[in-house]
Amino acid sequence: MATTRAKITSLGCYVPPNVITNGDLEKLVDTNHEWIVSRTGITERHVASPEMATSDLATSAAKIALENRGVNADDLDAIIVCTVTPDMMFPSTACLVQNNLGAGHAWGFDLIAACSGFIYGINTAANLVMSGQNKKVLVIGADTMTRILNYKDRATCVLFGDGAGAVLIEPAGEGEDLGFIDFMGEIDGAGGPFLNMPAGGSRRPASHETVDQNMHYVHQEGAQVFKYAVTKMQEYSRAILERNGFTGADLALLVPHQANMRIIQASADKLGLPASKVVLNIGKYGNTTAGTIPLATRDAITEGRLKKGDLVLFAAVGAGYTVGTSLWRWAF
Ligand SMILES: CC(C)(COP(=O)(O)OP(=O)(O)OC[C@H]1O[C@@H](n2cnc3c(N)ncnc32)[C@H](O)[C@@H]1OP(=O)(O)O)[C@@H](O)C(=O)NCCC(=O)NCCS
């Protein structure tokens, strides 16, 4: 099979309509708007209504991406759903989305890499396309984090929101100098204890005890994660630029995972990037885990900050730990 270039040809995002503001959270836990904004940059976040699950957010985002490109779901070769909040342990959310879309000829799977999930997903999809195995791959980053938040724990419940974004990845045209350039990342399981959901898997199946001990909620040691994220975001962003003969000056845009405004600003400072080259939209959505990068990309496009031919770098650090950076020449 011939090697061909892969490009992102369409993008669609969905956030549920309900919004929780910092003021709303002040009524639930001992926190305040000033603390949340100054420590994280978050003002509000969208929250799925009780009947909505991750596959619903993912399906809505996918439909917009397909519609924007005028592609029929039946033409999809593969569906990759990046999520840590699947509707259930199995079947995969990808199967649920496939059925919702009526994608009659797709294979697919869920990908667990937490906040790096979307970057791992587009890397996998790009390679499926470049190998010639698939021609239309849908990658969806979708999470319903509010389902696994303890609204009695102020250190975590203020940070996350719900949302989804989908992209279509297809072969670039003959000789077209657009699309995927490179990926670099690492996983480091030694970071597992600092950010996880302890129960509900085969190690600690759901039981009265696990529920009583709040083990089905996000557990995070924020300061540890913060330090790792700042170090790795800039280390890998710098490395992938260097490996491809670029510097920060060549970048049109850095689209970082939106976990904390201070992580993003520290990483941008270390890379010498001005604020105009960095997307920061955490204020409106909080951390939507696998959803942040497509949502931030969508906002950048809407604001006219990302155009065809631009060099764009996606970068994330997430639970695991997982680290991912992905460099693209934007194609639409
Ligand atoms: C979670 C995070 C915002 C906390 O910020 P921080 O500046 O590190 O704050 P600390 O955890 O050191 O806590 C400082 C104080 O604020 C308090 N605090 C924590 N959450 C609070 C809240 N929502 N409102 C008010 N006070 C809060 C703490 O209890 C602590 O009080 P103490 O000093 O009396 O013990 C920050 O660590 C972070 O963003 N970490 C990375 C998170 C992340 O990226 N996660 C996803 C990775 S993909």
Image: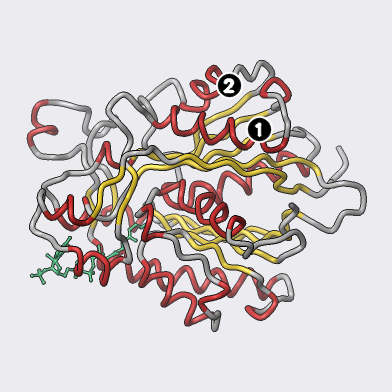
**In screen coordinates, is 148 left or right of 166?**
left
**In screen coordinates, is 122 left or right of 278?**
right
Q: Is the residue indicated by label 1 positioned so its CB lies within 8 Å of ligand 1?
A: no
Name the residue: 72% across, 37% down: 69
SS at badge 2? helix
Amino acid on which the number 1 mark rests in the picture: Leu
- Residue indicated by mark 1: 66
**In screen coordinates, is 311 left or right of 142?**
right
Cβ atoms under marks 1 and 2 closer than 8 Å: yes
Residue 271: x, y in percent? 54, 80
The image quadrant of residue 101 is top right
Amino acid on which the number 2 mark rests in the picture: Leu
SS at badge 1? helix
Q: Nearer the viewer, residue 283 or 289?
A: 283
Q: Nearer the viewer, residue 276 or 150?
A: 276
- Residue indicated by mark 2: 101
Q: Nearer the viewer, residue 73 or 112?
A: 73
Q: CA distance from mark 1 to mark 2?
A: 10 Å
